[in-house]
Amino acid sequence: MAMFETFDDELQALAVRARDGDAGIRKVAMMELAEAVEEGAADLLLAGLSDSDAGVRAAAAKALDEHQGSAVALGLIAALDDADEAVRLAAAESLADKKEPAATDRLIERAGEGNAFVQAAALRALREMQEPAAMPVALAALQHPDATVRREALAVLGYLKAEAALPALLVAAKDSDASVRRSVMASLVFVKSGTPGVPALLAGLRDPHWLVREEAAFSIGKAKLAEATLPLIAALDDEAWQVQAKAVNALGKMQATAAVAAIGGALGHELSNVRKEAAAALGEIADPAALGALEAACNDPDPDVRKLVRWALGRCQAVA
């Protein structure tokens, strides 16, 4: 009983400080309320969202990241309209991981409004909820002039893995903004071999921006698209090492025996990151044809590469 009385006393003390005439004291009280587990702590933070001082409101919005419930989610949604940018940003960040079903309808409503910041924040929260009812508003948001809104809409569709959204995703794959095209590549992770989404991913491997090419390679690997084997082998010569690494990784996930020789060549890459991916991929494929290249890499200067090479050798020798 004494422990709970202590908690009540601490919360009461914070409540007093949350109403202090000094904004600095109120702000610190909001920050401390983030760790408060007592019933009523969230109510004090929600009240803080209406404080006259922007610093206090921002601290309250940030602290609400640690609290759950429909009232919290709805309070943060309302704070997206705050006059102060720091408050809006804190509210959007705290709202992103709430996954509060009771706030779904309000989030969908806000995601369809004209304010780009609010729309993006609402879509970001809907993404985590993986709510099918969010698909229509996400599809509509793909036409928004703001690239941030389009990216968040694509993330919603990607999390839903909805084939019904594929036609819109294929259009978005030609977006003028590279960050949007990258999001499309991430959203296409659900496509299956032989479906209309495959050509878009293959085209992504040839995109002018390396981040798009990297994301395309990653999604191809996750989807294990056999028809992408040769394009991925070609990507091993990409000018960006990040793309090379993701292509090697994808070929390993696909267990592409046709790529063993090309991946073996990557064991001699100047960057250890690529060599590690190559050794891991050859271990995943486990083809005896890789033994020569792996044996030659046993004395690699990087200990992590050597460890993966030994593992891959064991896998290949087991089937030899």
Image (cartoon, rainbow, N blue to C red):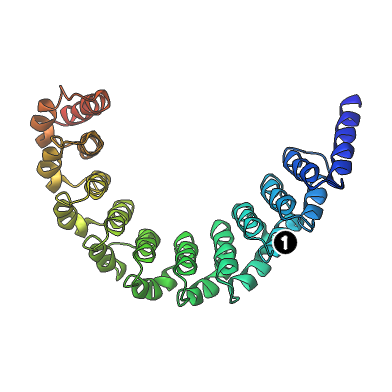
Name which quarter of the figure residue 266 lies in.
top left
> Where does the image place residue 5, in percent across and percent down from the top left?
91, 30
Residue bearing mark 1 = 74
Name which quarter of the figure residue 271 lies in.
top left
Name which quarter of the figure residue 77 lies in.
bottom right
Which residue lies at the image location 74% right of the left edge and 59% below the top edge? 75
- Relative to 172, does residue 129 appear above or below in the rendering? above
- Relative to 33, does residue 316 appear above or below in the rendering? above
Q: Secondary structure at mark 1?
A: helix
Q: Is residue 153 left or right of residue 37?
A: left
> Where does the image place residue 56, in percent across and percent down from the top left?
74, 50
Q: Quadrant of the C terminus?
A: top left
Q: Quadrant of the N terminus?
A: top right
How many C-alpha atoms fall within 10 Å of the one at disc 1: few (<14), some, or many (≥20)? some
Nearer to the camera, 158 or 54: 54
Count of numbered circles in the view: 1
Residue type, mark 1 in image: Leu
- Relative to 12, does residue 295 appear above or below in the rendering? above
Nearer to the camera, 11 or 169: 11
Q: Is residue 225 left or right of residue 169?
A: left
- Relative to 196, does residue 16 appear above or below in the rendering? above
Q: Is residue 269 left or right of residue 164?
A: left
Nearer to the camera, 210 or 228: 210
Which residue lies at the image location 22% right of the left edge and 56% below the top edge? 226
> Where does the image place residue 28, in percent across and percent down from the top left?
75, 41
> Where does the image place residue 49, in percent across and percent down from the top left?
76, 56
